[in-house]
Image: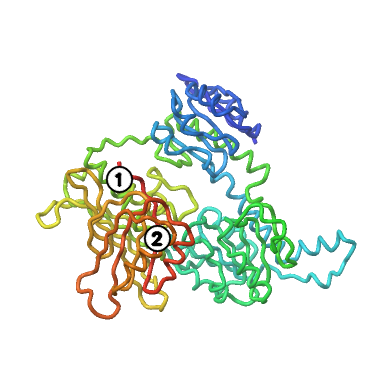
Amino acid sequence: MTAIQTPRNVTQVFKILAADKLAPEGLKYVEQQDDAELVNKPGLSEDELAKIVGEHDAMIVRSGVKVTAKVLEKPGRLKVIARAGVGVDNIDCEAATKHGILVVNTADASTITTAEHAFALMMALNRNIGPAYKKFTEGGWDRNKFEGHQLAGKTLGVVGFGRIGQTVARRAMAFEMDVVAYDPFINAQTMLDGKVKMFSQFADMLPHVDMLTFHVPLNDQTRGMLNAETFAQCRDGVLVINAARGGVVDETALIAAIDSGKCGGAAIDVFTKEPPPADHPLRTHPKVLCTPHLGASTEEAQQAVSVDAAAACLTYLRGEGIKGAVNAGGLRIDLSPEQAAYADLADRMAQLISPMVTRGISQVCIELVGKQLEGGKSMIERSALVALLRGHLSDPVNIINVNRVAEARGITVRTTTVEEDRVRGEQLVLEVIGPPDAVDSKTQPADRTRRIVGRVYDDMKPRVVEINGYHMDMIPAGDMIVLQNDDRPGMIGIVGTLMGKHKVNIADMTISRRPNPEGPGATALMVFKIDAAADKQALEQLKASEGILKVAAIKLPEEK
């Protein structure tokens, strides 16, 4: 890989600290730039790194170095941190943002490598490469036992149609496969020039595919999405490929489906626990092909992420743009205290309502009531969009790129500012509208709109005053649970008893009924704050309790 140096009038030389072991190509790229000085010091301790970090304009890391709040306590001239790779768990992004430091990653650099591995797994699974190789190395032959299937003419279902999903789809079409895809956050009937039919419901796609490949993040909406119930919707003999995240496919249900013949086999690169236990049935099942999380493990990818990380640093330092932003990059917006409070409120409101958005997004409508909020419109809009989308997408999303991400997925965003009136007063209204073909579990047209309303009063504290027609007055902060239930006697007692059983202390509770609650099907909404996050078992028991319709646990920032 040859770095291209562009002659430039050098007025400043940027010091680039390589704080982790990088591929030589990345180091060479920096050395060849006439406005950059490389400082290669991998393996420093936290104290050593904190001592010198402020002497540099940029820092490049992989996963071996932890960039903690302590490291960034005295950032000096540091302006950008680049992660040569995707995950930024080893970087304190909050501390970086606080100090106005941009954090970037190189997600695009490993796209092809990850997609190729998923495709290689699919090919090997269809042609029984794993068991045939094992038998051969044991001295056997038995070629008649390893008859496989060709890819041409088969239908591939791609779950998650972002960068990697689309890359896999293009390769599948080159092999003369038919491709369909599920992604609730793409508001389009087809993609890739009409060649890929899109489904907004996972279960709707399943009866049409011979193979499933997963390319989604792990979150509450995707965890265990392929399970005993959804397997029942699949064709008999469906093949499963998961090179995305462990936990997206329920491993117990997968083994059961293979043993029953519902699933014809699986190729798995990621696991719920990594590495899986030595006695895990996936390790030895004759119809399962496993690899130890090799999705991004190629020489080319490691070279690419190193070069891309260095290039991203210099692009930002030169004032030429931002590539791969993970955080806000210290983006300075001149907001009044009131506008800033509403931007914070928008973030909290969107986080509260995001778990209720399970069927995708067609439109996001924001109404700012109060002309004095006009100047903060862009930041308020972006804050809401980031909080809405980041838990549903595998691609990085932040206030820098969120509008482009929404546009690419066909999500219409409309923000309006209207005069304050006597009835409503100053407030923020956020409405999230699902696609028109969204259906509920009874296949009837679903309520497509999720609505939340908030206000900031004279004390400058954020408040939510309405969620989906339920009126209330509560401060969205800390660990919270939103619960919809049948409107009948005893529900508060059921919730309180169960929370007490699990040692979860309810610090505050708001209960609301919709207007005219009498009659069959009447419901109520409980929103309560708890002193500490409830464990998974408590939430599962809460969801399973009679009369409880929906439960969502949310962790919001504490009150400022």
Q: Is 234 on the left or on the right of 469, as rendered?
A: right
* Residue found 57% across the figure and 61% down from its top: 214
Q: Position of residue 540 (x, y in %)?
A: 46, 65
Q: Which residue is mark 1?
A: 344
Badge 1 vs badge 2, beta-carbon distance below 8 Å: no
Give above or below for 26 relative to 525.
Answer: above
Mark 1 is on which residue type?
A: Asp
**Which is more toward the observer, 94 or 233?**
94
Give above or below for 278 relative to 52.
Answer: below
Mark 2 is on which residue type?
A: Gly
The residue tagged with tag 1: helix, strand or loop? helix
C-alpha span from label 1 to label 2: 32 Å
Q: Is 375 on the left or on the right of 24, as rendered?
A: left
N-term mark: 1 or 2: 1
Residue 232: image quadrant is: bottom right
**Which is more toward the observer, 62 or 306?**
62
